[in-house]
Image (spheres, helix red, strand yellow):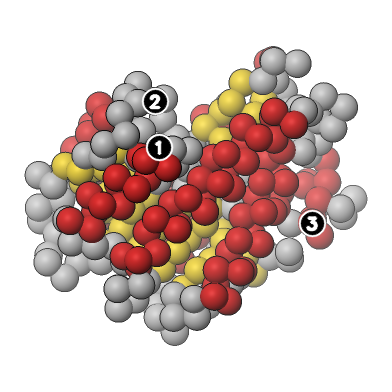
Amino acid sequence: MTANTHTNTDTNTDTSASAHTDTSAGAHATATATRTLVTGANKGLGFETARRLVDAGHLVYVGSRDAERGRRAAERLGARWVRIDVTDDASVEAAARSIEADGGLDVLVNNAGVESRGAGNSVIGAADVTAEHLREVFETNVFGTVRVSHAFLPLLRRSAAPVIVNVSSGLASLTRVSDGGTPAYAYPGVAYPASKTAVNMITVQYAKAFPDMRINAVEPGFTRTDLNGNTGVRSVEEGAEIIVRMARVAPDGPTGTFLDDEGPLPW
């Protein structure tokens, strides 16, 4: 079965490893503003999250693989943009150096994600899924989350109030997926929920390792985005609510949790 990968990122038209940060936008942010990177932010949940955080006074970096799309999104938002491909070590490292030179980072939102689907936007179930499907999804959703988090940890550890938000999914919940009374039970896919379950474990282990940071996994709900072929039932405004809330979490707020906009979720 041929798979189509639906993404919360953007189409990569520039394979250069060098990062570029546009500092001409976001000039209205104060020198003491919270500095926030949102990956996959040129559209969908990432764009809405960036918009809301700009409105809240953050200096936001729109993380984008595609320079033109990233630049346009940043201009629309009054934000800055940085070229970053979460699947590429050199790109991520260059982005970290660029943001470090621009003043550092306080909040990281690991939003970039993909879901491998088949013909007609069909979900690839257990009978058809291959190791290659999982590898493709894990490269962005899992390895990308670790790659970006690792590269930006030195910057975050210098912040007075460091925060990481990992965008997960209700499908990551083993409890829900195995409970016949929940919508998650009916989802037949393997790669995407497995990747998000891994993201939840990464969240917990990082939160234990860095107790001075607020590190949480969030579930935006079944949101209409390119990732699911715009079949979701929630708007990006609704989906971004929990992401924005946890990006603004207080230093004494929760850490190592899995949440949606109504509260904690079962693992």
Quadrant housing residue 84: top left
Circle 2 residues within 10 Å: few <14, some 14–19, many ≥20? few
Marks 1 and 2 sit apart, C-alpha to C-alpha, by 8 Å
Q: Nearer the viewer, residue 237 or 153?
A: 153
Residue 142 located left or right of residue 159: right
Q: Quadrant of the N terminus?
A: top right
Look at the image and tell me whether residue 62 can be seen. no
Q: Is residue 94 above or below residue 189?
A: below
- The CA span between labels 1 and 3 is 29 Å
Q: Residue 100: image x %, image y %?
A: 23, 58
Residue 85 - label: 1
Left/right of residue 129 with respect to residue 247 in the rendered view: right
Mark 1 vs 2: CB contact within 8 A: yes
Q: Identify the residue shown where x is 20% and y is 43%.
A: 21
First along the sequence among labels 1 and 3:
1
- Which tag, 3 or 2, sits closer to the chain's start? 2
Circle 3 — which element?
A: helix
Residue at the spot 84% in from the left edge and 32% down from the top edge: 126
* Position of residue 52 in the picture relative to residue 204 (left or right): left
What secondary structure is marked by label 2?
loop
Kind of residue at disc 3:
Leu
Within 10 Å of the Cα at label 1, are there few (<14), some (14-19), or many (20+) other Cα atoms?
Answer: many
Query: Label 2 amino acid?
Result: Asn
- The residue furthest bottom is 252
Label 3 sits on residue: 174
Residue at coordinates 56% horizontally, 35% vertically from top-left? Answer: 114
Q: Determine if residue 186 is in view.
A: yes
Pinpoint residue 51: horizontal percent, then vertical percent: 31, 49
Q: Nearer the viewer, mark 1 or mark 3?
A: 1
Name the image quarter holding the C terminus.
bottom right
Q: Of marks 1 and 2, which one's residue comes earlier in the chain?
A: 2
Q: Which residue is mark 2?
A: 12
